[in-house]
Structures are given as structure tokens and as C-alpha cells.
Image (cartoon, rainbow, N blue to C red):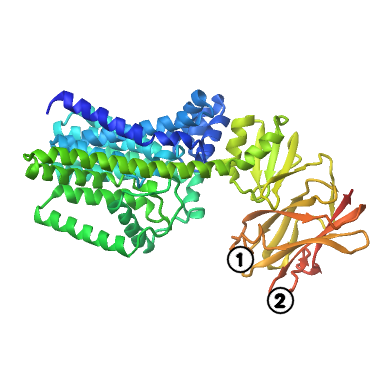
């Protein structure tokens, strides 16, 4: 095997990656991309190390290497979306080359390394992991595969330098994503299953002591991070029997890694059908037979590697295609081995080289077309998400420093969406929140409440700085059924006819709530007549009270149309709860849990 051919092969693989993912430059940024860039942009140099590396400062995940990456990128790229895509594509190209080198070195056969890397470069199943620049899998892959490369070198020659390089790469992988905790197990399997060099138990313990200590230390850091609760609280990460069915669905993706896949993960629960299930069963049987018949330690190792690298994500009650970015390495290596076997049997025939080259070219072309179509759809979707921002941007060339934009029922997510868009356009002085969060309307230099009309266009309510209201009862106010009103905010007390009256309510569940109650807000004229009202379960029915956890803080924004009201002052809003089935209202309780009334009143408002 000549050095020139190896270099040509490497350039060919990089070219395949670059050409295949070139359409990603049409996509721009979306969702987690905005979150990571905004977070990086708001970090001050004076406390950058704390904000990036202190686990107590993390709000989503403890992934300091990704935080450092975006912090550095933001200093150079700002909001240049294409530059971020270049970095992610470069990570993917590096991972393809690493697999090329690893498969070649372990198998001692160049064709296996090249073909395995070629298939890995052209799989379409994990497209979201490369196109979505806020996703960490490609960065993780660089250090995950690098650590294996150095570890294999250490197992081959016993060089201490390779050992410590493998350890350093493992630390970086752990800092990139929690999945890297599987690396010591993979190292042990490579050591005992593939290499199988004799070693005493004491030597084995010394060999893995540092890696075990690093894993324990990182687990402690992860436990300290408040964001750890995101696993179980928001995403529903839970160990149980459902993991088996999730594993089966992931196997479908591994055995059918080509085709049209989304450029953004949509969290499906099921990806297979009768035909794909049948094929997966056949493929598993064939692999098991091959491993048993040939006593193949490599197939056994690859199978366990796949299971181990999938294990951390199986407790999620859904699938994400990007999670197969590392596990599918085993599929690429097996395909490389099958190609080498075919070459050994048919390679002497003249037609083989031509047919093989044509086949690989057609695979690259077909997958390139599929990726292009997926990226085109994702680009259209990303542009749709930016529509509300564009509408507001056209109306507001600038905002005053320290301006709050509060969105009611936004059609585009604010976190990982609108917040990042406004940050990139207006800088740090504009803060974006939504109706699930505390507003603090009068804690800023200027504030606006945005809602969306029937055409889904944003409409603005300018917050009156000195507007004052009063409640007939002192806050907090307890209702029956363990519901407490802790506070409220109103954007304005002077409302033009035709505009809605905004009301932001802050609730808390003081205990377990066993029914779904409806909150009513009635606009009452000075003569006591109800002129407008809003009756709905919290957040337009999306957060029923039965789903409230004890002690949970709930923010909810209500818009009451004032079109039927006549111009006058002295309007009030009456608020309360009732059971939609029985129409029975919940009582307001005093300090002795005695019934006081069945509503509270907030006043006063003026209609102009």
C-alpha cells in the first residue's frame, strides 16, 4: 500500500464530505444554534471560565468543551451562520478520516478502512447531527475516535505517550458530552476482545485506574450541575422496560441508514414498519451466524460497541437520528469488511474495479441528492421560523438599551429561537422572554408584550411604565384545590378600543391537584356588566392543572378582547377558577382556610 494512494484516498473522502454537505449553507441557524450562540455572546470575558466550566452555572447541559467552542467561534464569526456550518462539516470530515485510519490500522487492510470511511461519510441517517450546528455529536466524535486511535496504539506498542494522549482525548470527550462515559468500557473491550495480550490483574487495574477516576470525577460534576434535572424533568429520561423497544427502533435506523431523513430531529417514537422490522430480524440473524461461524471477535466487539454507545440514550421516550452518529461506525466497518471479502473473491476480474467504483459513485450521488432534498426542506422551515422576527425587525430598526420583549403564545420558540435572533440583531441590550416565564415588565428601561393575531402576525402592546393596579385581596391569594395566586402584572391600564387587555398571572401549586380546572378572567364595566371574558385552562389548555407538580411555579398570560367595551374608566377584571364539568367555582380561602369569596378583582382600567 503506497503512501501516495493513502493520501489520495484521504483527499477523496474529504471531498465527498464537502460536496455532500455543501447545501447546508442555505440553512442558516435554527433552534439550539441560536441558544448556544446567544449564550456564548452574553458571556463576559471577566467571568468566562466560570460561566463555561463551573457546573453550577449551566442551565441546559454540562458540556464545557461545547461552551468553549461557541465562545471562541462567536468572537470570530459573530452571527455568520455559514462559518458555523464550516466548522461542523470540518468536524465530520475529521471523524471520517479518523475512522479511515482506525479501521485500516486495526484490520491491517487499506480497503476496509477506505470503504468503511466512505460509507460513514455518506450515511444520510444522522444528517441532523451535522447540519444542526448546535448539536455536539461531531465534536464528541473527534475526541471519541481520537482517544480510541491512541488507545489502540498504546495496546500495540505499550508507549506511555500514547496512553496519556488517549487519556487526554478521553477528558476532552467527557467535556464534550456525557456519552463519553462509555469510553473506558470500549477500551476494555478492545483490550480483552480484540488485542488479547496477556496481562496480570494488578497491571490491568493500573491500566484503567486513571480512566475510572476521570469517569467518577465527571459524574460528580454532572451531578452538581442543575441542568442534570433536564434529563428526567423535561425530556423524560427514565430507565425501564421501554428501553428495549427504543433499542429496536434504533436498530432499524442502523440497518437502513440510507434514504430521506430530516435535517432536524422530530423526536419520533417509532421509525420502522413491517418490512423494515423483517429486514432487521434477518440482518441480526445473519450477523449472529457470521460471528458464530467464523468466531469473529471483531463482529462481537462491534455489536457490543453499538449497544454501549446507544445505552445512554435508550431511556429517552423517543428517538433522535443524530444519536446514531457514533454507533453507526460499526455498520460502516462491517460494510468495509464485506467489500474487502467481495474484492478477495472477485478482485481479479476486470469488471470488479469498474463495477465497484460505479457502485460507490452511485451511492454517493443518491445520498447526496437525498441530503440536498432534506436540507432544502429544513432551510424552508428555518426561514418560516424567522418570519415573526423579520416582521418585528422591519417595524423596529432599533430598541432602547435594556428593552424587554415578552411573547404570548409565540409561534416560534423564544429559547433557542427568537431570543437568539434578537440578540444577533440588537445585541445584549434586548432581552426576550415568553409566557412561561416571569416577565418583570417594569424592571427594564422599556418593555413590549407581543401576541399574534388570527393571521399569525405579531402585534405589540407597549408597556406603560407607571401603570398601577390594585387587588381587592392582598397577595398571595389561596384558592381551593391547592392553587395559589402569588402575583400578577398588566402591561397597560389604558387600553384603546379594539386592543386586548393583557394580564400575566403567577400561580403556584401548593399540593397535588387531582382535576383540570378552568381559569376565568372577566372584564367588568363600571356598572357591573361583563363586557368581555376569557375562559380557558392554563396556557390555552396546554398545561392542565392536573399536570402541575407540587410547588411548581406557573406563569400564564391572558388576553381579554376589549372591542365591545365603551370608552370609560373604572373597568375591573374578575379572576377565578371553576370545574368545567360541574361549573362549580373554587373558593378563595383566608388564613384559617375559611371561604371568603369565589373570585378576586383587579382594577382599575380605562378604555379610550
Query: Is residue 203 at all visible to an observer of this figure?
Result: no
Per the image, the residue denoted by label 2 is 582
First in sequence: mark 1 vs mark 2: 1
Could you tell me which secondary element the residue under label 2 belongs to?
Answer: loop
CA gap, disc 1 and disc 2: 16 Å
- Between tags 1 and 2, which lies in front? 2
Where on the picture, by quarter, is residue 195? Answer: top left
Query: Is residue 10 at all visible to an observer of this figure?
Result: yes
User: Residue visible at 61% across and 69% down?
Assistant: 514
10 Å neighbourhood of mark 2: few (<14), some, or many (≥20)? few
Q: Where in the figure is residue 433, as x and y percent of width and height?
A: 65, 43
Left/right placement of residue 449 relative to residue 358 reads right
Per the image, the residue denoted by label 1 is 546
Looking at the image, which is closer to me, 595 or 140?
Answer: 140
Identify the image quadrant of the N terminus: top left
Could you tell me which secondary element the residue under label 1 belongs to?
Answer: helix
Left/right placement of residue 271 relative to residue 441 reads left
User: Residue visible at 64% across and 48% down?
Assistant: 410
Looking at the image, which is closer to me, 554 or 538?
Answer: 538
User: Residue visible at 51% across and 53% down?
Assistant: 234
Left/right placement of residue 76 relative to residue 390 reads left
Q: Where in the figure is residue 470, as x and y percent of width and height?
A: 85, 52
10 Å neighbourhood of mark 1: few (<14), some, or many (≥20)? few
Q: Where in the figure is residue 338, as x and y percent of width and height?
A: 16, 46
Looking at the image, which is closer to me, 554 or 295?
Answer: 295
Amino acid at each position: 500500500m503506497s503512501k501516495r494512494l493513502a493520501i489520495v484516498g484521504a483527499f477523496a473522502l474529504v471531498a465527498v464530505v464537502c460536496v455532500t454537505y455543501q447545501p447546508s449553507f442555505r440553512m442558516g441557524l435554527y433552534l439550539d444554534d441560536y441558544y448556544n450562540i446567544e449564550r456564548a455572546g452574553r458571556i463576559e470575558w471577566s467571568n468566562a471560565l466560570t460561566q463555561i466550566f463551573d457546573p453550577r452555572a449551566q442551565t441546559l447541559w454540562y458540556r464545557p468543551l461545547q461552551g468553549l467552542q461557541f465562545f471562541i467561534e462567536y468572537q470570530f464569526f459573530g452571527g455568520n451562520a455559514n462559518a458555523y456550518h464550516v466548522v461542523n462539516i470540518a468536524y465530520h470530515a475529521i471523524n471520517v478520516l479518523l475512522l479511515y485510519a482506525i479501521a485500516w490500522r486495526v484490520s491491517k487492510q487499506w480497503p476496509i478502512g477506505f470503504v468503511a470511511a466512505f460509507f460513514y461519510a455518506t450515511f444520510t441517517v444522522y444528517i441532523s447531527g451535522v447540519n444542526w450546528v448546535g448539536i455536539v455529536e461531531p465534536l464528541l466524535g473527534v475526541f471519541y475516535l481520537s482517544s480510541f486511535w491512541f488507545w489502540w496504539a498504546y495496546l500495540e506498542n505499550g508507549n506511555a505517550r500514547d496512553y496519556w494522549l488517549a487519556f487526554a482525548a478521553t477528558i476532552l470527550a467527557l467535556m464534550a458530552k456525557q456519552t463519553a462515559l462509555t469510553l473506558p468500557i470500549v477500551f476494555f473491550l478492545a483490550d480483552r476482545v480484540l488485542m488479547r495480550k496477556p496481562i496480570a490483574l494488578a497491571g490491568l487495574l493500573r491500566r484503567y485506574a486513571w480512566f475510572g477516576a476521570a469517569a467518577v470525577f465527571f459524574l460528580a460534576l454532572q451531578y452538581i450541575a442543575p441542568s442534570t434535572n433536564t434529563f428526567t424533568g423535561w425530556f423524560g429520561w427514565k430507565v425501564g422496560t421501554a428501553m428495549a423497544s427504543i433499542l429496536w427502533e434504533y436498530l432499524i435506523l442502523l440497518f437502513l441508514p440510507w434514504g430521506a431523513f430530516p435535517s432536524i430531529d422530530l423526536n419520533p417514537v417509532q421509525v420502522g414498519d413491517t418490512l423494515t422490522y423483517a429486514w432487521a430480524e434477518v440482518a441480526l440473524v445473519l450477523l449472529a451466524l457470521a460471528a458464530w461461524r467464523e468466531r469473529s471477535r471483531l463482529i462481537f466487539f462491534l455489536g457490543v460497541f453499538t449497544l454501549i454507545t446507544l445505552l445512554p440514550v435508550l431511556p429517552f421516550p423517543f428517538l433522535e437520528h443524530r444519536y446514531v452518529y457514533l454507533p453507526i461506525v460499526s455498520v460502516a466497518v462491517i460494510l468495509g469488511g464485506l467489500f474487502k471479502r467481495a474484492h478477495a473473491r472477485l478482485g481479479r476480474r476486470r469488471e470488479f474495479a469498474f463495477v465497484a467504483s460505479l457502485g460507490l459513485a452511485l451511492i454517493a450521488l443518491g445520498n447526496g441528492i437525498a441530503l440536498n432534498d432534506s436540507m432544502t426542506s429544513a432551510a424552508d422551515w428555518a426561514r418560516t421560523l424567522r418570519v415573526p422576527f423579520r416582521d418585528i425587525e422591519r417595524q423596529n430598526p432599533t430598541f432602547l438599551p435594556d428593552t424587554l420583549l415578552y411573547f404570548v403564545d409565540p409561534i416560534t420558540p423564544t429559547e433557542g429561537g427568537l431570543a437568539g435572533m434578537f440578540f444577533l440583531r440588537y445585541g445584549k441590550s434586548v432581552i426576550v422572554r415568553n409566557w412561561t416565564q416571569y416577565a418583570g415588565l417594569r424592571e427594564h428601561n422599556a418593555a413590549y408584550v407581543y401576541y399574534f393575531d388570527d393571521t399569525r402576525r405579531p402585534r405589540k402592546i407597549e408597556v406603560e411604565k407607571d401603570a398601577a393596579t390594585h387587588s381587592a385581596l392582598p397577595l398571595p391569594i389561596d384558592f381551593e384545590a391547592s392553587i395559589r395566586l402569588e402575583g400578577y402584572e398588566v402591561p397597560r391600564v389604558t387600553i384603546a378600543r379594539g386592543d386586548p387587555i393583557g394580564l400575566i398571572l403567577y400561580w403556584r401549586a401548593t399540593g397535588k391537584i387531582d382535576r383540570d380546572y378552568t381559569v376565568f378572567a372577566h372584564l367588568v364595566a363600571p356598572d357591573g356588566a361583563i363586557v368581555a371574558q376569557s375562559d380557558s385552562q392554563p396556557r390555552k389548555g396546554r398545561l392542565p392543572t392536573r399536570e402541575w407538580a407540587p410547588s411548581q411555579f406557573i406563569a400564564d398570560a391572558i388576553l381579554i378582547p376589549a372591542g365591545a367595551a365603551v370608552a370609560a374608566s373604572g373597568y375591573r377584571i374578575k379572576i377565578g377558577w371553576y370545574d368545567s364539568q360541574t361549573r362549580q367555582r373554587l373558593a378563595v380561602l383566608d388564613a384559617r382556610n375559611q371561604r371568603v369569596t369565589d373570585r378576586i378583582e383587579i382594577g382599575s382600567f380605562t378604555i379610550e
